[in-house]
Image (cartoon, rainbow, N blue to C red):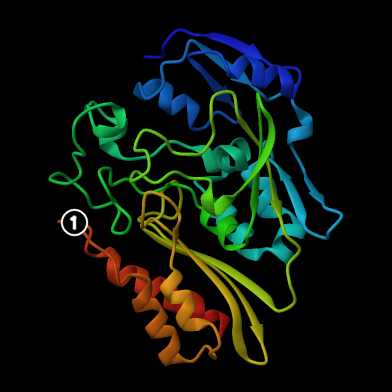
Amino acid sequence: MMPSFSYVRAGTLDKAVEALARDGACLHAGGTDLVGCLRDGILDPAVVVSISRLKELAGIRQTAEGGLEIGAMTTIHAVSQSPAVQSGYPALAMAAAAVGSPQLRHQGTIGGNLCQKPRCWYYRGDFPCLRKGGDLCYAVDGENAHHCILGGENCYIVHPSDTAPALAALGAIAVIAGPDGRRSVPVAAFHVPPSDDYMKETVLGPGEILTGIRLPPPPDGLRSLYRKVRARRAWDFALAGAAVALQSRNGRTAQCRIFLSGAAPVPYRAAEAEAILVGKALDEQTIAEAARAAVKDAAPMSGNGYKVPMFIGVIESVLGEMA
């Protein structure tokens, strides 16, 4: 059953920030996650603030530096189909195309995909779990087939976004507006791990709105890919996924960023795997070594040990295609 709330459709960004700063306010963009959260009792807002009229927050534009700026209200479908994204940042186009179903991609926004709530069935169900103010994470001794194998502490959710790992791998910057003005945060630092605060998903404070994403100009020799494994072709979230952005020079890896989806409470950077690749050619031995290093610190629970070899296979597949 849906809760009762008042509804504000902001005409300007300043008005949206002002309304969102009130106690008990939450944001409405595309609404694909918001409606589910309201029905599941995850959110019980006094007021819902819509930014659907703010056309300046939609669209994909080239920056003066040669990168891209993507408005937070741009639909996932538009991101996946953008020629500029497909040519310069294929990992992001692939990640956007892997989100949900066609209906969800046409309605959902890139900003909402980054800010969505966890999909853990205990958090979404009738369980007083830690993230909802309870005393424990039920996944530890419960059904945990889809929970994290890396970076878990106190709360063992996996981050649900496909676009966040791709954006992080590509060095994207999140642009935020709030009561104290504007600020920028790397997408790689936009999400909050449970070890820092298990009640928050992002760095957004009261009244703050993610207004857009800035992508740096793609350097020479940059290649990027995103690969996702899921139980079904559509609708499902990643069981295991990898976004790789790799720059080559003279047949060897000059720079590399690898972020995993379906692995951890936030997009997980496989820094040890990156270190193995830098300075080397993408041969079979190096790829296998990097894939194993990415899950070296994995601590699977009773029902999700299958993810470890799955991630190894996904990473080997992506790097093998790049080779």
**Residue 129, located in which quarter of the rendered image?**
top left
Say what secondary structure mark 1 lies in: loop
Identify which amino acid the numbered label 1 is placed on.
Met
Residue 50 position, x and y percent, is: 63, 20
Mark 1 surroundings within 10 Å by alpha-carbon count, few (fewer than 14), some (14 through 19), many (20 or more): some
Say which residue appears at 15% left-offset and 44% top-offset.
Answer: 142
Along the line of sight, the residue nearer the viewer: 224 or 75:
224
What's the residue at 38%, 55% (across, down)? 262
The percent coordinates of residue 41 (x first, y second) are 35, 21
Judge whether 29 appears above or below 256 on screen: above
- Residue 107 falls left or right of residue 122: right
User: Hey, which quadrant is residue 134 in on the image?
Assistant: top left
Q: Which residue is drawn at 30% across and 28% down?
A: 132
Residue reaching furthest to the right: 64
Which part of the image, by quadrant, shows the C terminus? bottom right
* Residue 174: % across, % down: 63, 45
Left or right of 27, for residue 116: left
Give the residue furthest to the front. 180
Residue at the (43%, 68%) spot, across then down: 270
Please provide percent x and percent y for residue 147.
28, 50
Q: Mark 1 points at which residue?
A: 301
Quadrant of the image containing the N terminus: top left
Across the whole image, how many numbered discs are drawn on residues?
1
